[in-house]
Image: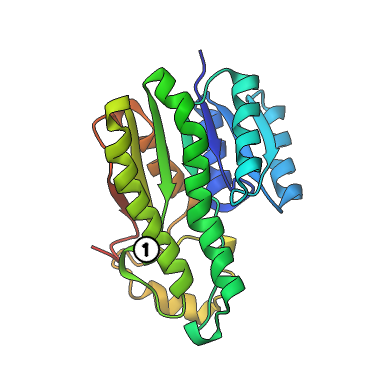
C-alpha cells in the first residue's frame, strides 16, 4: 500500500520541490496551497500527467476547520496518512517599530499556529496506526534570530520548541517529529533582496553559495524515511555552514 504525505505550502519553492520528490518516490501526495492556485494547479496537473498519485487541496493552515477538512479528505481518498510536512509560511521584513499587531499576528498564525493546527489534525490517525512522521520547516533565524525579522524569527523559534515537545509526547506512539532549519535558499521568499544584498550574504556562508529547494526536499525525504526511524526531536540545519 502506498504511503501518503501532505505537503503544506506546496505550490512553489521548497514545498513544490518536496511534492515532486515524494511523487517520484511513489507516495500519494496532497498538494496544499492557500492563495497560489495557478502554480499549485499547474504542479498538480504536471505530476498527474506523468502518472503520479496526487491531490490538490486549498486550505489556509491558520484556519482550524480548513485543515480538518483537508485531513479528512486525504484519509477518505487515500485511506491513510503517513507523513506531514509543515512547510507553509510567510515572511515579513521590517523593524519591530514598523511591525504592527496585524502583521505580527498573521506571521504567528501561519508560521506557528498553522503547524499546530496541522499536527493536531493528523495525530489521531497516526496514533491509531502507531506510526507516522512529522517534519516541520523552521529556519536558521529560528535558531539565532534575524535583525528586522523579529516576528518571523519568533514564529520559527516557536516551531522548534513545538517540535521538541511534540517529539517527546508522541514517541510512545511510534511517531517521530523533527524540524529542518533552512539557510538562504533560492526561492521567491527571498525576492525582496537585491542582487547586491544576496551577494553580500553569500560571502558570509562558508560553502559560498545559496542552497536549492531540492536540497531541502532531500533532507525532508530522509527524515521521513525508515533510515531516520531513530531520529526524533531534532533540528537539522541545512544552511551551508552559516549556523554551526
Q: x, y (%) of residue 168?
A: 27, 39
Q: x, y (%) of residue 207?
A: 31, 63
Disc 1 designates what residue?
A: 142
Q: x, y (%) of residue 160?
A: 35, 54
Callout count = 1
Q: Is 63 above or below relative to 221?
A: below
**Closest to the observer: 186 or 234?**
234
Q: On the rendered structure, is 241 left or right of 189?
A: left
Residue at x 55%, y 80% (from the top left corner): 99
Q: Which residue extends farthest right?
A: 38
- Other-residue count near label 1 (Cα within 10 Å), few / some / many at <14 / 14–19 / ≥20: many
Q: Is residue 82 visible to us here?
A: no
Q: Is 95 above or below relative to 163?
A: below
Residue at x 36%, y 75% (from the top left corner): 203
Q: In the rendered image, which quarter contains the C terminus?
A: bottom left
Q: Is residue 104 visible to us here?
A: yes
- Secondary structure beneath disc 1? helix
**Closest to the observer: 96 or 86?**
96
Q: Is 114 above or below relative to 142?
A: above
Residue at x 55%, y 35% (from the top left corner): 6
Amino acid at each position: 500500500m502506498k504511503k501518503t504525505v501532505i505537503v503544506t505550502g506546496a505550490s512553489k519553492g521548497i514545498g513544490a520541490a518536496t511534492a515532486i520528490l515524494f511523487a517520484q518516490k511513489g507516495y500519494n501526495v496532497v498538494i496544499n496551497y492557500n492563495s497560489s492556485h495557478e502554480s499549485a494547479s499547474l504542479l498538480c496537473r504536471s505530476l498527474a500527467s506523468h502518472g503520479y498519485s496526487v491531490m490538490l487541496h486549498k486550505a489556509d493552515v491558520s484556519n482550524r476547520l480548513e485543515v480538518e477538512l483537508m485531513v479528512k479528505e486525504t484519509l477518505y481518498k487515500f485511506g491513510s496518512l503517513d507523513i506531514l510536512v509543515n512547510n507553509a509560511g510567510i515572511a515579513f521584513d521590517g523593524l519591530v517599530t514598523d511591525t504592527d499587531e496585524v502583521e505580527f499576528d498573521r506571521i504567528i498564525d501561519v508560521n506557528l499556529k498553522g503547524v499546530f493546527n496541522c499536527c493536531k489534525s493528523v495525530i489521531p490517525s497516526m496514533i491509531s496506526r502507531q506510526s507516522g512522521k512529522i517534519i516541520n520547516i523552521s529556519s536558521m533565524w529560528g535558531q539565532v534570530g534575524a535583525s528586522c525579522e523579529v516576528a518571523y524569527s519568533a514564529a520559527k523559534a516557536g516551531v522548534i520548541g513545538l517540535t521538541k515537545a511534540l517529539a517527546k509526547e508522541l514517541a510512545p506512539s511510534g511517531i517521530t517529529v523533527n524540524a529542518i532549519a533552512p539557510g538562504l535558499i533560492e526561492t521567491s521568499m527571498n525576492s525582496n533582496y537585491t542582487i547586491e544584498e544576496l551577494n553580500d550574504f553569500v560571502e558570509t556562508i562558508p560553502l559560498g553559495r545559496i542552497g536549492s529547494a531540492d536540497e531541502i526536499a532531500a533532507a525532508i525525504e530522509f527524515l521521513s524515511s525508515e533510515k531516520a526511524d531513530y531520529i526524533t526531536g531534532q533540528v537539522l540545519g541545512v544552511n551551508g555552514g552559516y549556523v554551526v
